[in-house]
């Protein structure tokens, strides 16, 4: 199997060109980068032993969102045969032309861009100045422009040549109009147990007393007043009553009930139930889809403090180390989990079914990177399999909730700092990581999912537990997400 990491532009350089640029009317440059990369792979992969007819694309977080955008991108037609989307915040649709125009006007009215009247002038602005301005932009526009999500303020734009419509809306209303119809594209969708934990930790750094006022005001900043009111008053996500006057009772039965309740609402509303909604529609339209929930992970650097350090908590990004095999060798469960994930992913990439055969090979970290292959040699030095996996380097998108707090950011996966990224970075398997990640689930609780059947999705009973215990986090409440509380793409798509 061959793995290639695509480079593509993020932030203002990848998604927000100025009106002076010829690309302004079709601003999704990062999406076009990915399509260009895929075309190159299709053209040249045979020279290193690959098969252009067996390409699988994959991404994590906003990288998964970019894969979702490809579903509706005409120029991507025929460039891959399957897709893996990890932790895609599927509640968020893509940006309408009107929303992008408002963000564009806001950014280029800021200093130093506002002093430029020509494209050459804008091109001469330093990267550091652009990053500083971008940080300010993403900390403000979610609160000043309706329809801009806090954790992904800069996204591909639809109603354009590159992306004619929002794929989530098209999947709902006219699935056979997608560039990749459900019947033509097997997909694998996963979320982690506590997706919202990173965001909650950034909002509330420590335990919070039970308070409906705090709950409502914070939820309003995230999803608006109407949806917030439905959320805090619902039977599914309301706070319990305080049953005594003791200081400990104010924090609820677990001692951290406020954050646990809020995290569950964020996890379900932005990730889990939005993914389930897509899975239901994909399957209903004749598509093959498998859905998994990570019950175990390895702590990513963003999650090394606060809420995400709690026992058994698996936060957004904690699936990265096991996926790429870059966790510390000192963690016994990391090797087992990584091997299990590797087996499922390789099975899906090679057979379009995530259930590995009994003879499937386990992950090995014995290889090293020595040099780039010389494409001009027509790949004669390269061995390889006929299967090919491709994964765009994705950006992390964490949310903070109140206007006074620091805002969400986009970062490349290989960078420990978040908001300064303007492009994605390449990633590769390695035998060790530069940090010392910790397991987010006791190794004694791990089960061997490699011997369990991962059923093709037809209902929520088919969601598959990846690592850890077998106690999935429960079904999405019927008639709530997407109905009583609409997803973002329904409101602003």
Image: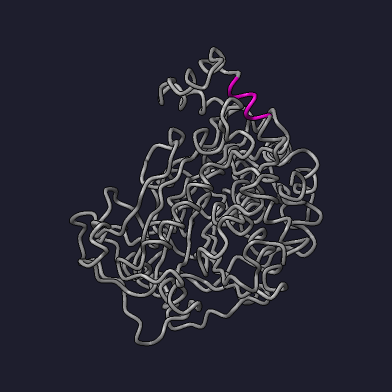
Tally of numbered tags: 0
Instruction: Please report the bounds of the magenta region as a residue range.
Output: 102-108
Name, please, the residue furthest toward the bottom: 358
Residue 176: name its quadrant: bottom right
> Residue 197 or 481: which is nearer the viewer?
481
Name, please, the residue furthest toward the top: 115
> Residue 283 or 197: which is nearer the viewer?
283
480 is higher (above) or lower (below) than 119: below
The spot of residue 489 in percent (x, y) is 71, 49
> Residue 475 or 215: which is nearer the viewer?
475
Render colour scheme = one colour
Does residue 67 show up? yes
112 is higher (above) or lower (below) than 59: above
Residue at horizontal 38%, vertical 55%? 5
Does residue 211 show up? no
Which image quadrant: the N terminus? bottom left
Residue 271 falls within the magenta-colored stretch: no
> Residue 369 or 266: which is nearer the viewer?
369
Q: Is residue 336 left or right of residue 488?
A: left
Residue 105 falls within the magenta-colored stretch: yes
The spot of residue 195 in percent (x, y) is 55, 54
294 is higher (above) or lower (below) than 396: below
- Magenta stretch, overall SS: helix
Residue at horizontal 67%, vertical 77%? 458
Residue at horizontal 32%, vertical 79%? 361
The spot of residue 461 in percent (x, y) is 64, 76
The spot of residue 333 in percent (x, y) is 34, 67
């Amino acid at each position: 199997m061959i793995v290639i990491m695509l480079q593509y532009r993020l932030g203002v350089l990848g998604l927000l060109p100025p009106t002076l640029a010829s690309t302004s009317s079709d601003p999704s440059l990062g999406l076009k980068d990915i399509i260009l990369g895929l075309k190159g792979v299709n053209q040249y992969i045979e020279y290193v032993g690959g098969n252009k007819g067996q390409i699988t694309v994959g991404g994590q977080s906003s990288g998964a969102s970019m894969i979702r955008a490809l579903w509706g991108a005409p120029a991507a037609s025929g460039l891959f045969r399957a897709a893996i989307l990890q932790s895609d915040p599927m509640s968020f649709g893509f940006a309408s032309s009107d929303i992008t125009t408002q963000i564009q006007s806001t950014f280029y009215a800021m200093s130093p861009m506002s002093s430029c009247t020509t494209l050459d002038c804008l091109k001469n602005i330093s990267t550091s100045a652009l990053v500083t301005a971008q940080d300010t932009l993403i900390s403000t526009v979610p609160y000043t422009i309706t329809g801009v999500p806090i954790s992904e303020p800069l996204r591909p734009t639809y109603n354009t040549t590159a992306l004619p419509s929002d794929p989530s809306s098209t999947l709902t209303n006219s699935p056979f109009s997608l560039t990749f119809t459900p019947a033509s594209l097997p997909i694998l969708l996963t979320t982690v147990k506590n997706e919202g934990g990173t965001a909650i930790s950034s909002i509330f750094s420590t335990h919070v007393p039970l308070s409906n006022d705090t709950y409502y005001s914070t939820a309003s900043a995230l999803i608006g007043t109407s949806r917030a009111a439905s959320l805090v008053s619902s039977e599914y996500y309301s706070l319990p009553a305080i049953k005594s006057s003791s200081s400990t009772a104010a924090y609820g039965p677990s001692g951290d009930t406020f954050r646990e309740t809020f995290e569950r609402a964020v996890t379900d509303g932005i990730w889990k139930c939005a993914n389930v909604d897509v899975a239901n529609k994909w399957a209903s339209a004749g598509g093959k889809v498998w859905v998994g929930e990570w019950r175990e992970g390895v702590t990513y650097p963003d999650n090394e403090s606060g809420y995400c350090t709690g026992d058994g908590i698996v936060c957004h990004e904690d699936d990265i180390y096991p996926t790429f095999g870059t966790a510390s060798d000192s963690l016994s469960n990391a090797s087992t989990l990584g091997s299990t994930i590797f087996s499922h992913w390789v099975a899906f990439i090679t057979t379009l079914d995530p259930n590995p055969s009994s003879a499937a090979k386990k992950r090995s970290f014995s290889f090293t990177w020595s040099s780039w292959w010389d494409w001009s040699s027509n790949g004669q030095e390269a061995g390889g399999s006929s299967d090919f996996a491709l994964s765009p380097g994705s950006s992390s998108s964490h949310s903070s909730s109140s206007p006074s707090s620091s805002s969400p950011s986009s970062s490349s996966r290989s960078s420990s700092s978040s908001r300064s990224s303007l492009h994605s970075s390449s990633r590769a398997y390695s035998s060790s990581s530069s940090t010392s990640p910790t397991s987010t689930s006791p190794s004694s609780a791990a089960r061997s999912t490699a011997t369990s059947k991962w059923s093709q999705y037809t209902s929520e009973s088919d969601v598959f537990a990846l690592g850890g215990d077998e106690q999935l986090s429960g079904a999405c409440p019927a008639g709530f997400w997407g109905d009583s509380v609409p997803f973002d793409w329904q409101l602003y798509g």
